[in-house]
Amino acid sequence: MTFSTTVAFSDWLRDICERQPEAARLLSAPEEEQQRGGYFHTLREIFQQPSSWLHTAEQMSLLASDLRRCLAGIRNLVLTGSGSSEYAGHCVRLALQDQLAVNTLAVAGGVLLTHGTKALPIERPGLVVSLARSGDSPESVGALALLLEVDRHLRHLVLTCNANGKLATSFPGDSQVQVIALDDGTNDRSLVMTSSFTNLVIAAQFLGFLQSPELYQSRCRKLSGIAGELLEDHFGALAQVASLNFQRAVFLGTGAGLGAARESALKMLEMTAGKVSAMSETYLGLRHGPMSYVHSDTLVVCFLSSDPTVRAYECDLMRELDQKNLGLLKVVVGDDVPADVVRDHDVVIDCPGLAEAGDDGAPVIDVVVGQLLGFFRCMHEGLRPDSPSESGVINRVVQSFTLHFPAGGSSAAKRNPLGDGN
């Protein structure tokens, strides 16, 4: 399914163009011009997210019975991936730990390669959930091959956007590996992950709703609506923010929001080819040294929790930044943002209904703001969002590199079909 070619999607884009002149300017250009401008794929992949989430929610709900068997009796769960796919795991870790009542970690694919089972909880059986867009990165395939070799008491669930990727196809017939390939429309063609990222988050969230698929679909519909309104109402405002004279950006989040902050910082860094330096941090962690990063040329993006206690800590930190006159301006994202944390030149991205969706659902909304800021800053810098790394320093899929397996892991190495491969 190609979400961006449906009639409903086209009608919705027309509505946005009527309300947002910047969207109309970009989308009214002929496709050839959009391709030359290097934004054809990225912009559509950002816009397709609200509709694609509904499709992913339906797909995952149909797999409830199979997934219940996959998770039955597990003592722990590990979410793994590389780059954006790792951050997707951080977006869902806390919620799954609470919902499943098992120890849940997010571990980078590279850490599994270097440290193997030492990086995993000790109790068995355990479930390792591998998240990937293409499934062709060396870490993704190599880590799974290694773990299959050294510990057969681990089960594996692959969530990928590419049914033809190595991660999805390299372990046929292995009873320890279950593969779920999302719709090919989620397999972003742009260098940067946008809809791939949020759909992996949406898919992984379902593991906490295996007994209540209807509730899961209801929440996904809510999140889809919020994201649609965000794009309709704030597209132009975020374009204006991205054109301001900042050279640094810091993204703040708490709990699951830190996963969104890490992904958003990566989007800014990737899409500007490093011309804008970016970092992520927790609100409370910012005081312990990283506040020195916040200069007068720094954009501060605040993903605001809906939990009263968490929000109290976050608002205290934002007031402290204001009292110290730190940062160029703040972009505050949340539901019912308190007026006293907003200065005259700050920008509020109000997301009605986000409190009802809860902090566990909020990362997919928060990261849309990060995606748009990265997209527009990329354009402002004269780069191409579909392929912002003009010198080829980074690629859509991480290029092949040598994998070093521990002694006794030779068969794992043989099972890993290396090639260009995130």
Image: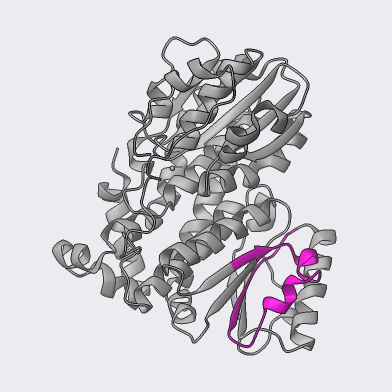
Q: How is the image coloured?
A: one colour
Residue 97's place in the image compared with 91, above or below, is above
In screen coordinates, is 260 left or right of 306? left
In screen coordinates, is 262 left or right of 285? left
Residue 54's place in the image compared with 295, above or below, is above
Residue 45 point in image, percent of width and height: 36, 53
Q: Front-most of 377 and 289?
A: 289
* Quadrant assignment, res 29: bottom left
Q: At 19% from the left edge and 66% from the top edge, which residue is drawn?
A: 36
Residue 183 point in image, percent of width and height: 37, 35
Residue 418 point in image, percent of width and height: 38, 30
Decide if residue 65 is in sight here: no
- Name the quarter where the N terminus is drawn: top left
Q: At 52% from the left edge and 60% from the top edge, which residue is drawn?
A: 266
* Quadrant assignment, res 317: bottom right
Decide if residue 134 is in sight here: yes
* Quadrant assignment, res 213: top right
Region of the chain picked out in magenta, as a range: 279-306
Residue 327's place in the image compared with 23, above or below, is below
Is 127 part of what is drawn in magenta?
Answer: no
Q: At 70% from the left edge and 85% from the top edge, which residue is drawn?
A: 326
Q: At 50% from the left edge and 48% from the top edge, which residue is drawn?
A: 198
Residue 227 point in image, percent of width and height: 50, 57
Q: Front-most of 323 and 294?
A: 294
Residue 419's place in the image compared with 193, above or below, is above
- Name the quarter where the C terminus is drawn: top left
Is 304 part of what is drawn in magenta?
Answer: yes
